[in-house]
Amino acid sequence: MQDGAVYSGVAIAVTVTLFADLRRLLPRGTDGPQRYTVREGATVSELLAAIGAMAQYDKYEGSKERAVGWPGMARGGWYMVDLFPGMTYNLRTSVMRIDVSIPISPNEVLIEFRGLGLKRDTAEERTQRVFDHNMIWGPFGRNLHEDLLGVTGQGRALRRGTDSRYLLHGREENNTIHDEVGMRHYYAEWSRRMGRPAYDPYREGKPEPVRAAA
């Protein structure tokens, strides 16, 4: 897909796996990869329009502004700090979550989730934070399950014998809500500490990945 040219009237079918926030755009009662039709040479923006564009969170039940926040942070704000190799401080809206990943074997990882509030919270504020943590931002909230369903869908879509096995990842959005800056930081730090590039860890001469133009 590209921009700025004139194309023929040929239509092409594109198979898309929606994950994370975009799963809200799945047709009711469906799951897994979805097929959309766009013109030959269509832009990514045209594909997103065919899918239904971005979700509008203010249209969903329960999307009201949270009643509690954090000192010095705007209501509805989000700050996140990743510490190499496996710790994340995630301050989002009304909940602070600390996630720690601990490898325990070559194919097993223990993930620890901790939700925090302010010591000075009133009983009512504490109740609201606990509710927001358990219903939305905590490990058993609806947000994480969307991601897990997305990972499952991606795995299905990338199996051999399916359609194109390309996956759009590493989003760059000025370090805002959906930017993959944490992932880029991890691989950069891993490369620095290991003395070898993450994209070619066995030094097989693989070329450096090309970053897409904005």
Image (cartoon, rainbow, N blue to C red):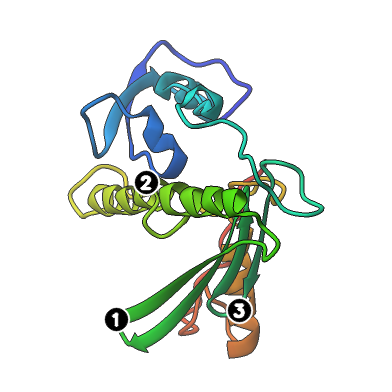
Vertical side of 99 occupied by 36: above or below: above
Q: Which residue is mark 3?
A: 84
SS at mark 2?
Answer: helix
Residue found 66% across the figure and 44% down from its top: 213
Q: Which residue is mark 1?
A: 107
Q: Where does the C terminus fall, quadrant-wise?
A: top right
Could you tell me residue 166's position as x and y percent? 38, 49
- Residue 212 is left or right of residue 158, and the answer is right
Give left or right: position of 159 versus 55: left
Q: Identify the amino acid type marked 1.
A: Asn
- Is residue 77 positioned above or below 6 on the image? below
Above or below residue 124? Residue 181 is: below
Q: What is the C-alpha distance between the residues marked 3 and 1? A: 19 Å
- What is the count of numbered marks? 3
Residue drawn at the location 55% of the way across and 25% of the way down: 58
Q: Residues within 10 Å of mark 2 (few under 14, many from 20)?
A: some
Residue 168 in percent (x, y) is at 47, 47
Q: Secondary structure at mark 1?
A: loop
Q: Amino acid at mark 2?
A: Glu
The spot of residue 198 in percent (x, y) is 53, 76
Q: Can you tell which quarter of the image residue 155 is in?
A: bottom left
Q: Which residue is mark 2?
A: 146
Q: Is residue 179 visible to us here?
A: no
Q: Are marks 2 and 1 in contact (CB under 8 Å)?
A: no
Q: Measure the C-alpha gap from mark 2 to mark 3.
A: 25 Å
